[in-house]
Image (cartoon, rainbow, N blue to C red):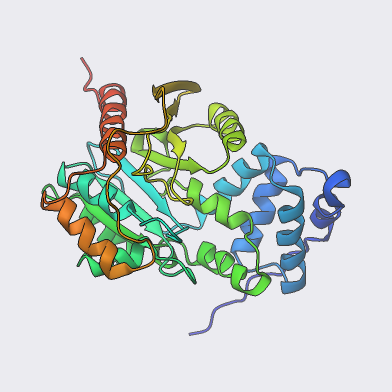
Amino acid sequence: MTTTPAAPFSAARYIKEIGRGVNGARALPREDAQTLFDAMLAGRVSDIELGAVLMAYRIKGEAPHELAGMLEAAHRHCLPLAAPPDRPVVVIPSYNGARKQPNLVPLLALLLARDGVPTLVHGSRAFHGRVTSMALFEALGVPLCATTRAAQDQLRDASHPLAVLPIDVLSPALSTLLDKRAIIGLRNSSHTIVKMLQPVGAHTPAEALRLYSYTHPEYRETLTDYFSHEPANVLLARGTEGEVVADARRSGRIDWLHDGHQRTMVDPTSGSIGEVPELPAGTDVADTAAWIRKVLDGTVPVPAPIVTQIDTIKECLKQATRVAWASPV
């Protein structure tokens, strides 16, 4: 059986707008950004044009409305993942991994699932020089889902609703764009978009609570502005080395962005915490997995900032569920 190759897509007129440098580049209309990103994901853009687009956006940056168009295109290239019938899912993107601090995304996900919260972690299997969540889940004996059907079945498991889904399974097209980093040596737009995915059901705010993090405080304002103007159900907080899990060493602000509103759920008066836990080095999979096991079995207490993060997630789910899943009177 043969397949018809995708028709080539000329990106020249788009590159002419976005590729004029920092001062001369212009943002594309939302519809054009969607069309261009869809063609990129479909493999219709030649290598030389694709490289030009990726570098142009790396220099120019994506405007909020361009991100919105790209995200719409990305959702079209995700394999179907049905939502649980009665509960929203917590969606945790994991694409950075650990460099120095331990990657505690698996701990966050396992604690949520243990409490009956449907939790989906999607991310990259490997990242050179970093410890990924996927590697840690495998070290902890948690299998990675081989299909989106397996993931949706896991999310409906009443006793432990956790699905860990590699991005190459969820969206081979996005995975291919992410892999361009190894060739170009720099991040590209797909690294931003993949963390914004709401891959469950019809991609609506009612079906999932997304966790999103920022590193630089000024980026929080950009994200707040974006999620305030787009359909959203997002918890926004400063993460740990680019991961969405709370920093185990200090408390931090957590904002809930939903239905066009912003609400600060956690606003600590000080970033420090009373007792800083003794953490493993973040560069060893076995050591981190062993420490996570100790927390799960109660030998080591759950770090206070992660307790706060979990409590906040549950409170947002409770409030959102009360509205979205209420039975008709």
Q: Nearer the viewer, residue 78 or 103?
A: 103
Q: In this orientation, which residue lies closer to the viewer: 44 or 266?
A: 266
Q: From the viewer's perspective, is residue 323 above or below residue 282?
A: above
Residue 146 visible, this angle? no
Farthest top residue in view: 329
x then y, percent, for residue 26: 82, 43
Give the x, y percent position of residue 305: 31, 37
Q: Would residue 137 appear left or right of 181 to someone viewing this image?
A: left
Query: Which residue shows up at 39% across the image and 25% down it?
Result: 268
Question: Where's the C terminus, which quadrant?
Answer: top left
Pick the front one: 119 or 130: 130
Q: Position of residue 252 (x, y in %)?
A: 41, 33
| Whether residue 246 can be seen here | yes
- Does 146 appear above or below 241? below
Which quadrant of the figure has residue 97?
Answer: bottom left
**In the image, is residue 316 above or below residue 156?**
above
- Position above or below: 144 against 31: below
Residue 211 horizontal side relative to residue 188, left or right: left
Quarter location, residue 98 = bottom left
Q: Residue at the spot x=28%, y=47% of the render?
A: 108
Q: Residue at x 68, y 43 (%)?
A: 31
Name the foreground residue: 38 vs 210: 210
Please identify the residue farthest to the bottom as the structure is shown.
1
